[in-house]
Amino acid sequence: MRNMTWKNVPTRTVDVGGVAFAYRELGPDSGVPVILLHHLMAVLDDWDPRIIDGIAAQRRVIAFDNRGVGASGGSVPDTIEAMGRDAIAFIRALGFKQVDLLGFSLGGGVAQMVALQAPDLVRRMILAGTGPKGGGGIDEINRVAALAYLKAALTWSDPRNFLFFPRTPEGKRAAKDYFARLKERTEGRDKPISLQARRAQLQAIKTAGLSAPDDLSVIKQPVFVANGDRDLMVASSLSADMARRLPNARLTIYPDSGHGGVFQHYRAFVPAVLDFLAD
């Protein structure tokens, strides 16, 4: 897969307990793979090509649609614990004994479940634009998301313009560039997210936000926590709280950026990820 990029790498499937999971793989054929876990309502084509290709220049990268998402079969479960179990089953179906994880937003919550449920499977972990279970702010998140979807409908635009990027000149430029990158792949694109998946994921986020916090002190692996300083969906204070509760974590808050801070600042984020994984 060395000569492939995110724009043209083929989508594969693997049988996971009788269910076909869709995934794409890039980078070297050896080494500990980096498994990517994605955000609410996202499919494979919603990964930023600059982040995928940048990490795959040095590391084996595998992005997948979890159960019921995009082209993967089955139905999306309504808890992040179950999503974590499905991710573990996918990783084991590919035959891996140890992986690194990169989870963004909801995917960061799922990554924490993988580390808690199968600690021997995880070597290192990157948690971006995410917070701990029981972090609170769920009512605020729902309000912010509803407002963003209303603005998007009124302007015939993607709600991520409002959710991922600040409405500053720099933020608007970053959003425009991000959406242009998402359109670079023109063939073999993923299936859109289903209504069942949307509802189940929203329920999972709500349940996690209202649940008792997990004991993150048991996650001993090195963790790189990243967020934007103006995240409307997961406040950077929640990311900082999560980093404090993880015994071996480092925290980076990117300036003048929102929930999609790692996309806006991919030129800094990708080298930081590679350094962290190679450390």
Image: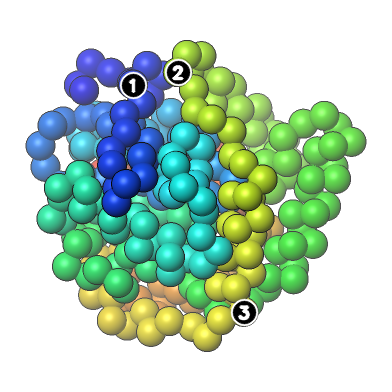
Q: Residues within 10 Å of mark 1 (few under 14, many from 20)?
A: some
Is label 3 or label 2 in front?
2
State the residue at coordinates (54%, 26%).
Answer: 182
Q: Whole-percent x and y of residue 57? A: 24, 29
Labels 2 and 1: the sequence-earlier one:
1
Residue 121 showing in the rendered view: yes
| Secondary structure found at label 1 | loop
Asked if the residue at tag 1 contacts the one at tag 2, i.e. Cβ–Cβ closer than 8 Å, the answer is: yes
User: Horizontal placement of 175 versus 109: left or right?
Assistant: right
Image quarter of residue 155: top right
Identify the amino acid type marked 2: Gly
Q: Is residue 245 left or right of residue 120?
A: right
The residue indicated by pointer 1 is: 10
Query: Colour scheme of this structure image?
Result: rainbow
Q: Can you identify the residue that label 2 sits on?
A: 188
Label located before the other in sequence (3 or 1): 1
Q: Secondary structure at mark 3?
A: helix
* Left or right, 55 with reference to 60: right
Q: Which mark is residue 55?
A: none
The amino acid beneath tag 3 is Leu
Labels 3 & 2 near each other (Cβ < 8 A) = no
Q: CA distance from mark 3 to mark 1?
A: 39 Å
Quadrant in the rendering for residue 228 = bottom right
Rendered location of residue 91, percent (x, y): 25, 51
Question: Which residue appears farthest toward the right when viewing the image?
Answer: 154
**Amino acid of disc 1:** Pro
Q: Residue at x 28, y 32 (%)?
A: 25
* Residue at horizontal 24 percent and vertical 68 percent from the top: 118
The C terminus - image quarter: bottom left
Residue 143 shown left or right of residue 43 in the figure: right
Whole-percent x and y of residue 8?
Answer: 37, 16
Query: What residue is disc 3 on?
Result: 210
